[in-house]
Image (cartoon, grey):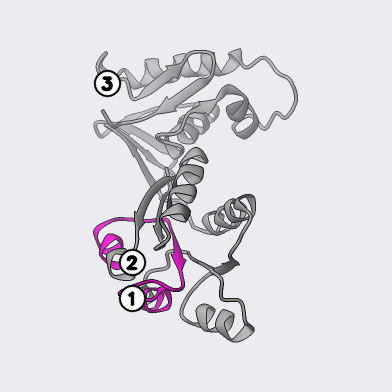
Amino acid sequence: MKHLLIVEDEEGIVQFLKQGLEEEGYQITAATNGKAGLEAFNDGKFDLLLLDWMLPKMTGLELCKAIRQMNTKVPILFLTAKDTVQETVEGLKAGANDYIKKPFSFDELVERIKVQLRDQPEEEILQLGPIEINLQKHQVTVDKKEVSFTQKEFDLLHYLVKNKGKVCSRTQIIQDVWDIHFEYDTGVIDVFMNAIRKKLNLKVEEDFIKTIRGVGYIANDES
């Protein structure tokens, strides 16, 4: 699950963004001033930042510059009422990746976020409890012991772990893993899931991939 940091001093906007983006499947941390935003950034690992320009204690511009001085490549989007060419250029020079003017369309914001996240290289190692997926080696291990998977089994497990913490519907899976975009019997997914679970040979209490009856599956290693 992608983790976003919102730094915005208007409580109404924070709640609106937090609720909307969580519904889109993102994990959200919020701060209401620049200094708190910098502290939150230093304490956590984030995939993208949404910064207001006019913030108390440290402006969004100052915060952006401070983060870029750490040599981090995390995408930064400004949310601001400032819209002159000079201000836009100033924000981009400070290290921002994109700029969206208030008031903004939530749908447009979501698409801009997706564009920035698509540009990020995927981690080579994905973890789900004792399960480790090495994308470079195309290898799956459980408790450091290698398990052999077919290509489609690997693709399905990779998809679920990549979307860890998010319910993946059968329709989404058949479209994204099988690349089928028409009505199709999604029962094939259950066949592959049974094979994956058998090969992983996890203990009963290690239910890291749960079936959501009537919907699909969710991979989660949080209790």
Q: Is residue 145 above or below residue 57?
A: above
**Quadrant placement of the C terminus:** top left
Identified by mark 2, the residue type is Asn
- Per the image, label 1 sits on a secondary structure element best described as loop
- The residue at 30%/74% (across/down) is 57
Using the numbered discs, state the Cα–Cα distance from disc 3 to disc 1 in whole angstroms. 45 Å
Q: Nearer the viewer, residue 172 or 24?
A: 24
Position of residue 174 measured from the top left corner of the image (x, y, whole percent): 62, 26
Mark 2 or mark 3: which comes first in sequence? 2
Using the numbered discs, state the Cα–Cα distance from disc 2 to disc 3 in whole angstroms. 41 Å
Q: Which residue is mark 2?
A: 33
Q: Of the residues tagged 3 and 1, which is closer to the observer?
A: 1
Q: Residues within 10 Å of mark 3 (few under 14, many from 20)?
A: few
**Quadrant placement of the N terminus:** top left
Q: Which residue is mark 1?
A: 58
Position of residue 109 measured from the top left corner of the image (x, y, whole percent): 59, 55
Identified by mark 3, the residue type is Glu
Is disc 2 in contact with disc 3, using a CB cutoff of under 8 Å? no
Q: Is residue 11 above or below residue 101?
A: above
**In magenta segment, residue 53:** yes
Q: Residues within 10 Å of mark 1 (few under 14, many from 20)?
A: some
Q: Nearer the viewer, residue 207 or 10?
A: 10
Q: Which mark is residue 206?
A: 3
Q: Residue furthest right?
A: 182
- Per the image, label 3 sits on a secondary structure element best described as loop
Position of residue 17 measured from the top left corner of the image (x, y, whole percent): 48, 50
Q: Nearer the viewer, residue 165 or 198?
A: 165
- Per the image, label 2 sits on a secondary structure element best described as loop
Is disc 3 in contact with disc 1, using a CB cutoff of under 8 Å? no
